[in-house]
Amino acid sequence: MDGIATTTDRISALISDKPGTEELLATSIDLAALQPLSHTNPFLSAETFSVENFLISRSHSSLSDFRAELRGYYGVLKEELVKLINDDYTAFISLSTDLRGEGVRIEKLKHPLGNLNQEIQSSVDQLKQIQETIQHKLDERAALREEKARLHLLLKLSETLVRLESLLFITKEELSETAFGNLTSRVIQKPDESFLETRSRTNRVKHVSRIATEFNQLLYLADKARQDKCAFVDEIQWRVDRVKTTLSSDLNHLFSVLLLADSSLETSNSQDFDPARRKFDIKECLRIYDSIGSWREAEEIIRRELVTPFIRQAIFPGALAVPHSPLAPRTPFTTHPASPGPFTPKTPYTAYPNTPWPRKTPIDTYFNSADFQLPLLNDLENPLASIFNKILRFIERDLKLVLELAETFSERYHQPNTSTKDPCSPSESPGFEIMSNVVWADIGHAIMEGLGTTIFAAGRPDDFHENYMTTQRFIEALEVLAPSLSAINKMRNHPVYLSFRKRWQLPVYFQLRWKDVVGDLESVLSLPSEGRITLRDGSAILSRYCVWLETLEVSRAPKNDAEKAFTTLAQYDNTLTLTS
């Protein structure tokens, strides 16, 4: 024993001699210890219990110790459960004891609740009744507001109508439907010169423009009132028609005076009819016609005042027999710049060489350009060309301004997808169509009626060919004077233009010409074999054939006749080849 103690002391002395030994001995070492099972165990208090993780955490203990530990924890849980049940049972028993007699008290509470429910239901019914009364009052006020607005509309309609009647100087004697019939009969007549002088002093153009503005407002108000099914509109409709008729009468007379402003009767006072003022007044009249949708009335005035009188003097059955003064030859000493085309004589048999004017340019480009020349025909020894030149001069002198100004108001109707329609005649196309409905309609009809028996006679091929080519050149010149490409298209699609095209009996003329040419050609081809067809003979025959073939539309000729003609040419070509 003494030896063991001595050895221990020696080991202790050796350990104590080493540096840091005291600190090492003072530091305690924590060894792994088994935590008992409790409610604070992280594996048992986790939201999702994992058996594998729990068993792994207890893997350092034996099965017997683990079983004993689980049994101990089970006993703790059972004891706590029994204690909890006992506590809750005691509280439940005490609650049932405390609730004795509460049923009677609850029954007593039902009686005031029933009365309160009845009072609340009565209040709800009263509120609903008040709400219905208020809503009824609001509906009545809304209806009154609508009636008030409708009444204001009718009052404004009546005031506008009365104001229009005052502006149009409609007297009280005319305030009846019977007098309205007399009014419609007198509106066609022209007012006297005193009326013109009086209205000119008060600036009649602006006066009529104001009336047109008021009339458009009247139509708007009447249409709006008609949508509300107001019987008042039907009662005053005859007055609205009377206002429109009177306005049209004044406007038509004013427009007629302005169109005739260049004549000696209307230009006695040059101050009232200066060109600038006249242009402004005509444009204003056309604007008024466009605003009220009376395009056809304006066209009728132009036809009645300008076109028809001229057509009666220029085109009649004996017009071709009347001697005409020939067109003065154009000299190089002209005030206009030189034309890019050559100064070759223009005959009715040839088209214009290098036509200096573009075919699809509006009228302002032609008339406002310095190098514009009226596309006249050569009327030397050609009375038909003289008549056509007279027509072209008339259009350039009297209708140029009207065509130019009317086109400014019709451009918006030429746009695609336009929905603007004539309020008076919805079936009509909107906008002015003076070139087709007035100029060409009257000229084409007059040519067919007055000169048709002469120029459309296909039995005289030479005269027919000359008339046809002259007329084609006239139509081309007429299209040059058209205000726009749309006007040209409408003129070409006009019924008078289509009828005019059909009057040319081109198939008959083709048959006659083909018969003459084939007869001459077959007589040459039937010569004896010793005869030779010279190039001069063949070219003479071909030139006679091609003179009328190239200038006419071959597509309009019958198919069989065209095939025969070209077959004859091919036969002649083969004969020349064999005999050469």
Image: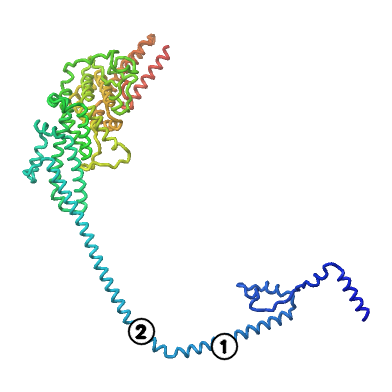
Q: Earlier in the sequence, mark 2 or mark 1?
A: 1
Disc 2 is placed on an element classified as helix
Tell me the residue that label 2 is attached to. 110
Circle 1 crowding by C-alpha within 10 Å: few under 14, some 14–19, many from 20: few
State which quarter of the image contains the N terminus: bottom right
Query: Image quadrant of residue 186?
Result: top left
Q: CA distance from mark 2 to mark 1?
A: 37 Å
Horizontally, is 488 left or right of 447 in the view? right
Which of the two residues, 495 or 524, is positioned nearer the viewer here?
495
| Picture layout, residue 531 above or below residue 128 | above
Tell me the residue that label 1 is attached to. 86
Give percent across and percent down for residue 403.
Answer: 24, 30
Circle 2 crowding by C-alpha within 10 Å: few under 14, some 14–19, many from 20: few
Horizontally, is 421 left or right of 563 in the view? left
Disc 1 is placed on an element classified as helix
Identify the amino acid type marked 1: Asn
Colour pattern of the rendering: rainbow
| Picture layout, residue 115 above or below residue 132 | below
Give percent across and percent down for residue 357.
Answer: 32, 23
